[in-house]
Amino acid sequence: MATHQQTNEEIATGNSNISDRGCETLFVDEYTDGILDPEKQMLGPVCDGGHIVANTAPGCWGPMITPAIRGGHEVTRPVAVAGAEVGDAIAIRIKEINVTSMATASGNDRVIEGRFLGDPYCAAVCPQCKTSFPETVLEGIGPNAVRCAKCGADAAPFAFTNGYTIAFDAGRTVGVTLPQEPTEQIARNARKFSALPDHSIQNPILTLAPHDLVGVVARLRPFLGQLGTTPAVAMPDSHNAGDFGSFLIGAPHQFGLTEEQLKQRTDGHMDVNTVRAGALLICPVKVPGGGVYLGDMHAMQGNGEIAGHTCDVSGTVTLQVDVMKGLNIDGPILLPLVEDLPFLAQPLSKQEQARAEKLAQSYALRSLEQSAPISVIGTGADLNAATDNGLQRAACLLEMPLPEVMNRATITGEIEIGRHPGVVRITFRAPLENLKHAGLLPLVSEYYEID
């Protein structure tokens, strides 16, 4: 993809009229070092209404055993969107998500003391030569394969407590967890089976060859664990959320933040399994250009991601971006597919509306509220804090008393866990009048085909 890289550089340096209006389609195959930094130059800009096409690298386990990656994940280099200013929002339509990995490995983790300073995701240290963020080499396969390039010590900060290797069918519809022999065969050709993008520097997690679970069948339903905009303060990409971000408050390493600085996050690391093809995500703009980035594609995940990790895969993604002027939101708003909405939050059918109108007339009620679904993301140090954060964001967005939001989320929606320990989505049907005042009605009405 050398041509695409060259085009991105030409756009970034402003050597074309494209730099003013943005290009129609931007191809992305470059990655950060794990740190989202508003001071670093972005790719683009892509035009308002334009497309971002990306080849994403696996998140979580591969970067977790690659100490040179400083943020715990390996996400795409952020892309500026023409016309996006601080206080705006960017509506991201997820047009396509395709898994390219043939297999992956994952499982529950444990940290290995002596191999990090305060946080194993973003402050790795070689246990022998004490080099920070050491470069590593792979020696053979298995749990001790990751070695410090300088001194040869076993250097991965994480190990499995219970792990598995899972292979996918050609259509990427189902996966099967494998026994030791085929797992080790795949491990010897891990980069190929992972389909790692050319510019990815992570150690493929397949190299560790975990095989505790054997013969389990799982369905694939891919989504993006990371999709969002650049925070206004530099932070590790895996920590751009209220739960993981809370680990940065007063941390002993170079990425430590204050509680006030953490409020400048954008919650791009959600692990919400409905952020999939066909959904629409509205993200806050907290730096000029917005800085849209993505990664951490998951092959599947149940609500909560309770094992701490799921099946991280490489893949290709197509997004369309639109600037929403002056929306001034604090965190993401999600419009899930109708089939992904909670039962109580789904738009009313014509038959349901007719029955409700008949019931209302019998009680001399002249008119009924018109509403549409909305899902507000909340994050915090734990699920209670995340729920409070999401409810408050919804109340501010819709200019609605907090107890009213709580009532609506109870009888026309529900609270769903995105990721344990601290990401939730607050989903309910909101009055069209409030959505109109918030500047969301045209988008919501179009998406859910509401007259």
Image (spheres, rainbow, N blue to C red):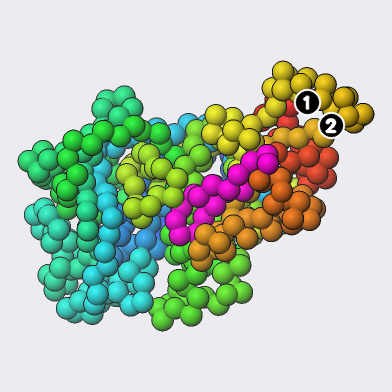
Position of the C terminus by quadrant: top right
The picture quadrant where one finds residue 136 is: bottom left
Q: What element does badge 1 sit on?
A: helix
Using the image as rendered, state which of residue 407 and residue 29 is in the foreground.
407
The answer to whether the residues at label 2 and label 1 have Cβ atoms under 8 Å apart is yes
Residues rendered magenta in the picture: 411-426
Q: Residues within 10 Å of mark 2 (few under 14, many from 20)?
A: few
Q: What element does badge 2 sit on?
A: loop
Using the image as rendered, state which of residue 289 and residue 59 is in the foreground.
59
Q: Residues within 10 Å of mark 1 (few under 14, many from 20)?
A: some
Position in image of residue 159 (x %, y %): 22, 61
**Identity of the residue drawn at 55% across and 29% down:** 339
Residue tagged by mark 1? 356
Using the rendered image of the protein, determine whether residue 429 is visible from the camera's viewpoint.
yes
Residue type for callout 1: Ala
Using the rendered image of the protein, determine whether residue 436 is visible from the camera's viewpoint.
no
Position in image of residue 68 (x %, y %): 30, 65
Residue tagged by mark 2? 368
**170 to 81, vertically: above or below:** above
**Identity of the residue drawn at 26% across and 64% down:** 110
> How many labels, in total?
2
User: In the rendered structure, which disc, 2 or 1, sits on the residue that comes first in sequence?
Assistant: 1
User: Does the magenta segment cover residue 307?
Assistant: no
**Identity of the residue drawn at 50% across and 63% down:** 382
User: What kind of secondary structure does the magenta stretch mostly adopt?
Assistant: strand
User: Does the magenta segment cover residue 413?
Assistant: yes
Residue type for callout 2: Leu
Position in image of residue 241 (x %, y %): 52, 60
**428 to 86, vertically: above or below:** above
Between label 2 and label 1, give the one nearer the viewer: 1
Find the distance from the CA under tag 2 to the CA under tag 1.
Answer: 8 Å
